[in-house]
Image: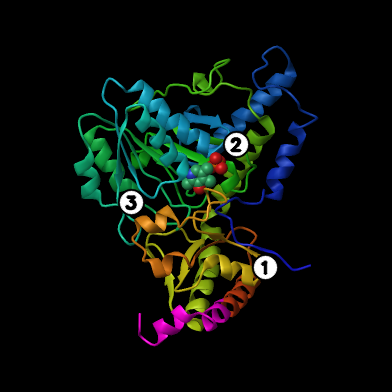
Amino acid sequence: MQQLIYLDYNATTPVDPQVVEAMLPYFYEKPGNAASRTHPFGWVADEAVDQARQQIAGLIQADPREVVFTSGATEADNLAIKGVFQLYQRKGQHIITVKTEHKAVLDTTGYLEKLGAEITYLDVDADGLIDLEELEAAIRPDTILVSVMWANNETGVIQPMAEIGEICTRKGVLLMSDATQAVGKIPVNPRETGIHIMTFSAHKMYGPKGIGGLYVSRQRPRVKLAAQIHGGGHEQGMRSGTLNVPAVVGFGKAAEIAGSVMAEESRRLAGLRDRLEQSLQQELEAVKINGSREHRLSHVSNLSFRHVDAEALISSFNRSIAVATGSACSSASLEPSHVLQAMGLAEEWLKGSIRFSFGRFSEARDVDRTVELIVKGVQALRAESPVWEMFKEGII
Ligand SMILES: *Cc1c(COP(=O)(O)O)cnc(C)c1O
């Protein structure tokens, strides 16, 4: 059996064993419903939920009452955008977002367009960054929401959130950020940054799948969202449904761990990332790093191998390294990434793009094995490629 190497931490992370341990009692020994007020089982569950809410609020420097639990970032993005759209109709129906957002945002704004919303999709430059002047110019009196992701899932590119927050505050428009790839990886403080609504997910930060959340500002301004799921009024009426107590507890523990290891971990992963990029660029010609080198998460590397088909490349090593090609998040689709297309990546680079994302359990030997297999694969594919030959001869 071939040794598998996991380098797809942006798709999901393994659950940290300490998180699993924290969750376990809440499956059997402590089975209460956090909404049960009449007996100790409920109180114990409710206390555990309170503690998790504090742990998560601590990580993002928020008031625990500003944390709302959902089933994940997809649901949180839906609740945030649809929730604002429904409640702020009197002000207008115009929303500004970015072409490189996650599908959880883009599919939601696409749906709202059918209901009469007008959406402005901002461009990004070759580095994946938005233009602040373009953003400011796009804001109108009827703009009800600006939605800009903190860090991109495909490239790791970090948007200038503080400047965006300053513009939105000055213009008096609500700012939302999908911070799913940023929370737990880099310092994130929505209040200080001028963000009013922020979404995130446990399974991208070593917590369990199926639990996520959103930050909703409670003061200056107090933001209200129209609920999308009704029944019981849980989560301050914003998201009804019995809380998944073990998952909530795991999410809290994951947040606590992230806060204490973040700085060290991101330094270590930057080392692995640089080792990968430097080795590949040394051993291969025509390897391009996609996205801003300066404004980028330290554990993500999106690379293009010119005139190489990424699918053929990962097949060359039997998919024994788990990486993402193309639009990883709209599963199964082999269309070129909408993110790289928005960045204007030329055709000869587009098909050969691979996202490597490292994490807590990655090691230097994983990088070395990856370099070995990628170099071998790229060389073999190029050796039998007429297009590569024409490129080398300067014909194209
Ligand atoms: C993973 C991801 C999501 C979706 O999160 P789920 O919890 O899986 O629904 C949304 N936005 C971004 C940026 C992501 O990386």
Q: Which image quarter is the N terminus in?
A: bottom right
> Ligand 1 near label 2 (Cβ, under 8 Å)?
no
Per the model, the C-alpha gap separating discs 1 and 2 is 32 Å
The verdict on residue 298 being magenta is no
Q: Main secondary structure of the magenta part?
A: helix
Is residue 217 or residue 232 the one in the foreground?
Answer: 232
The residue identified by callout 1 is 318
Mark 3 secondary-structure assignment: loop
Write the residue at 32% across / 46% down.
Answer: 162
Is residue 127 or residue 347 the one in the foreground?
Answer: 347
Write the residue at 44% across / 78% down.
Answer: 387
Mark 2 secondary-structure assignment: loop
Stretch of the chain drawn in magenta:
378-396
The residue identified by callout 3 is 160
Please tell me in which quadrant of the rendered image residue 212 appears. Answer: top right
Query: Depth-wise, is mark 3 or mark 2 nearer the camera?
Result: 2
Q: Relative to 118, is 389 above or below?
A: below
Q: Is residue 183 visible?
A: no
**Colour scheme of this structure image?**
rainbow
Q: Amino acid at mark 1?
A: Asn
Residue found at the very far bottom of the displayed protein? 393
Q: Amino acid at mark 3?
A: Pro
Query: Depth-wise, is mark 1 or mark 2 nearer the camera?
Result: 1
Q: Are marks 1 and 3 in contact (CB under 8 Å)?
A: no
Is residue 131 or residue 249 the one in the foreground?
Answer: 131
